[in-house]
Amino acid sequence: MAAYEDRYYWSHDGLRLHFRDYAGPADKPTVLCIPGLTRNARDYEGVAERLAGQWRVWCLDLRGRGDSAYAKDPLTYVPLTYLRDVEALIAQEQPRKLAVIGTSLGGIIAMLMGGTQKQYLAGVLMNDIGPDIDPEGLERIRGYVGKMGPWPTWMHAAWAIRDLNVDIYPHYSMDDWLRMAKRTCYLHPNGRIVADYDPNLAAPFKLPNSNAGVDLWPAFDALAGLPITVLRGATSDILSPRTVERMAARGPHVTVVTVPGVGHAPSLEEPESVAAIDAFLGRLSE
């Protein structure tokens, strides 16, 4: 495994937040990896270990995940608060430029950064997310958030994760499911395997009108002029082909890559994802 340093910063409301810092050159943008709703910094292990040394890489644990503190108010588990947390990180670290890789929720945060932190952005890679979110996929996610586990062994956790995700990653072996389990779960002091996030992440989904859509197209359009790569899992139920077409029509700064054989969301370790990340970062090097 590539070496990294566990580092911390403070949110505006007093939470101690964690990120992994993989060393790299100072004359390139820092690669900022923001995970999806129930994921954490470990979700980017494959990406970070491949890029470390060539690029500096930061992998975030959003509030309520991994080694970041859980929020006292679960209704702060919303994109605008996550944006403020990223702004706190930027204020502390003062990066020269950031190349943001955002999966799902992480891509929403990346879009929102275009409105408040664009001066720091070198480019954005959005992994299976866009300004329009397919309601069917959102309902699927709503159905499992905060309801996973606990399990008595890692193998039990891997089988449960497989049952939930086999349609998304039909080619995965049991080794792959075990790796996913160890990236998304942890061994609790009580000896049980549990999901590595605050179950109260589900709280905002329970609010009235939580299904009401928010218009994210202005946020996406605020990224205009930056290199943007959009990855879409070929069977995604979150990012539709129609939304991808609309994104691509915004201009030549938008590159679209379809990852075959996976749904929401690509792991970023598929050959097509690896090539897309390298091409994206290559554009920034130019």
Image: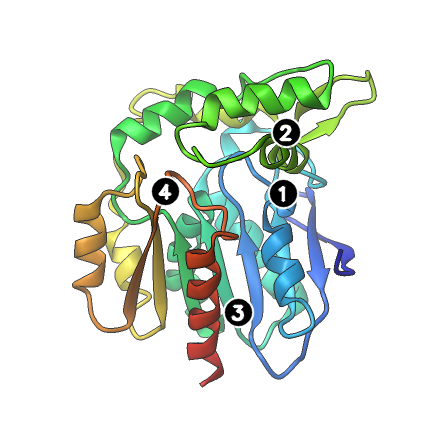
Q: Amino acid at mark 3?
A: Leu
User: Do the residues bearing badges 1 and 2 touch, measured as CB atoms within 8 Å?
Assistant: yes
Q: Amino acid at mark 1?
A: Asp
Query: Marks 3 and 1: which is nearer the front?
Result: 3
In percent of the image, x 63 and y 63: which residue is there? 50
Q: Quadrant of residue 63?
A: top right
Q: Which residue is mark 1?
A: 13
- For marks 3 and 1, the one nearer the N-term is 1
Is residue 6 among the parts visible in the rendering?
yes
Residue 98's disc is: 3
In percent of the image, x 34 and y 47: which residue is there? 260
Q: In 3D space, how far apart are the residues under numbered discs 4 and 3 (Cα atoms)?
A: 30 Å
Q: Amino acid at mark 2?
A: Lys
Q: In 3D space, how far apart are the residues under numbered discs 2 and 4 (Cα atoms)?
A: 40 Å
Position of residue 234 measured from the top left corner of the image (x, y, whole percent):
30, 44
Residue 261's disc is: 4
Is residue 122 among the parts visible in the rendering?
no
Q: How is the image coloured?
A: rainbow
Up-down relation of residue 78 to residue 131 (above or below) = above
Q: Quadrant of the C terminus?
A: bottom left
- For marks 1 and 4, the one nearer the N-term is 1
Q: Quadrant of residue 5?
A: bottom right
Q: In 3D space, how far apart are the residues under numbered discs 3 and 1 (Cα atoms)?
A: 24 Å
Q: Which residue is mark 2?
A: 72
In percent of the image, x 50 and y 46: which residue is there? 267
Q: Residues within 10 Å of mark 1 (few under 14, many from 20)?
A: few
